[in-house]
Amino acid sequence: MKLISFTTIFLLSLSLINVSTQAQHLTASDSIDVFLKNKMQQRRIPGLQIAVIRNGQIIKNNTFGKANLEYNIDATNETVFSINSITKAFVGIAIMQLSEEDKLKITDPLSVHLDSLPDAWRNITIQQVLSHISGLPDIMDADEQVLGHNDEREAMRKVKALPIEFQPGEKFSYNQTGYVLLGQMITKLSGMHFTKFIEDRQFKVSGMKLTRFGDSYDVIPNYAGAYTLTKQMGDRFIRNKTPGHAYMQFPIFFRTAAGIQSTATDLGNWIIALKSGKLLKKPASIDLLWTPAKLNNGKTCGFNLLTNGYALGWPTVTRKEHPAVGPVGGGRSALFVYLKDDLSIVILTNLMQGNPDQLIDEVAGYYIPDMHEANGFGLPANLKKLRTELLKQGFDRGITVVTQLKKKDPTFQVNENELNSWGYQLVSQKNLPAALSIFKLNVVLYPGSANAFDSLAEAYEIMNNQVEALINYKKSLALNPKNKNAADRIQALTK
């Protein structure tokens, strides 16, 4: 399966050439602005905020685009964005604050603090709930709506009647029910509603002047709203070219799972307060907060290859180079705290498919150059070895280099999909000769792959070599007669 369409790659290549030329004369901060504006255009993001934190202070905070499309209202640094599930990171801190006060232990079973639980729930621990390995049935229905029509008693009655999904600790499964239970627990142990506890102990302490709980129903001053590129048509969703309105309702009892509205500046101040000991007094509490949970088999698991673990309300980016914790929310908001670097980055958008978590590492590269994708950051270990040798010997010597690496290490192997993905990265970096060499290497290593030939054909087409493009599209179609892209391109090039 192709990673990007031909048209997207071609336009991206042209835009990146212009961006690169401009960036040569810009500061790191200005270059970030150029990068983000380019991504906003590509992804059709209406509005975006960024805050960068180093040395215990915010060194960059900027806002771009529109808070409101229909009234053409510009976004500013005081525009308030929904952070969706980043709210869970606040809940993790709240639980650890109660732990520091000896009101609970994260290893406590739920039944120690909550009554009237189904028998199958009683021994599930607070830690398992926080890290989404509890096995609890989900309080969200198939249409992503909260059970019980926003009535807490009805919602709990319905979800308690459902069977447990798996044995606690067996696997990672993102779940909202546990966070509703955590809200009940915080309210009980703190003596105040969980929203007030979080407001008093985190918002106020951190100086988060514009942050509040709310949803699309509430009238929120300077609110950026919510937009989406998808629209439901019957049982399927279609993707539009222009953003439309998205409506999000988070009943009050559900607002431990999602429901905080904030700004990048406020979140920057929250990170500063957390790291400086204002929210949690013990360094060990922060270490525990950010330690990914382990499954019963000893492994960690998370959303994807990037956010590949989950701690106490905080997704983790577990890796050897520049590990981080990275709360994400609604496909529209993200913040990364780099654990071994004095750097944190917050990016908020008002597009539900904005996916700023995919951009933050590249932004970090403007402060830590080895984190730039163009410098090989994020490549799997074997691809990094391959890249190092290709830079020395030349990208056109791919087969020779792979042979050499296999002689040194018989277990050396490069994955077809990873190689294909790297080729498209090189295209986006406007390094077309290197990209072409990688796609050529892939078809040699995987001669039975229709996708490898399809990607090689796309590379030739980008480089205006229609003859070779046509040859390789035909090879791809021969290997997979259902490859619609290859068939369409063959028809277009033949004409």
Image (tube, rainbow, N blue to C red):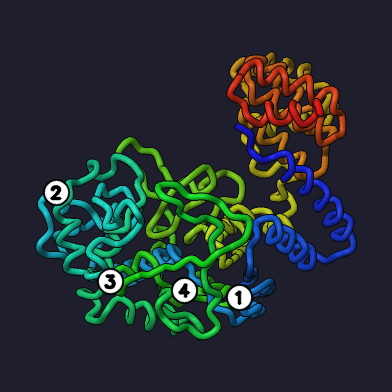
- Say few, some or many: other residues with alpha carbon within 10 Å of mark 4 (under 14 / 14 to 19 / 20 or more): few
Q: Which residue is mark 1?
A: 70
Can residue 327 be seen at all in this image of the molecule?
Answer: no
Along the polypeptide, which appears first: circle 2 or circle 1? Answer: 1
Which label belongs to residue 154?
none
Three-letter amino acid code at the position of disc 1: Glu
Residue 478: image quadrant is top right
Q: Which residue in the protein does label 3 denote? A: 253
- Residue 427 found in image quarter: top right
The numbered disc on residue 120 is 2
Instruction: Give the image location of residue 392, x and y in percent.
Output: 84, 30
Q: Residue at x 51, y 83 (%)?
A: 210
* First-in-chain label (4 vs 3): 3
Amino acid marked by disc 2: Ala
Q: Can you say which quadrant of the picture contains the C terminus?
A: top right
Residue 144 versus residue 190 in the image, above or below:
above
Numbered circle sitting on residue 277? 4
> Hey, which quadrant is residue 488 in on the image?
top right
Looking at numbered disc 4 in the image, what kind of residue is underneath it? Answer: Gly
Going by the numbered disc 3, the residue's amino acid type is Phe
Are there few (<14), some (14-19), or many (20+) residues within 10 Å of tag 2?
Answer: some
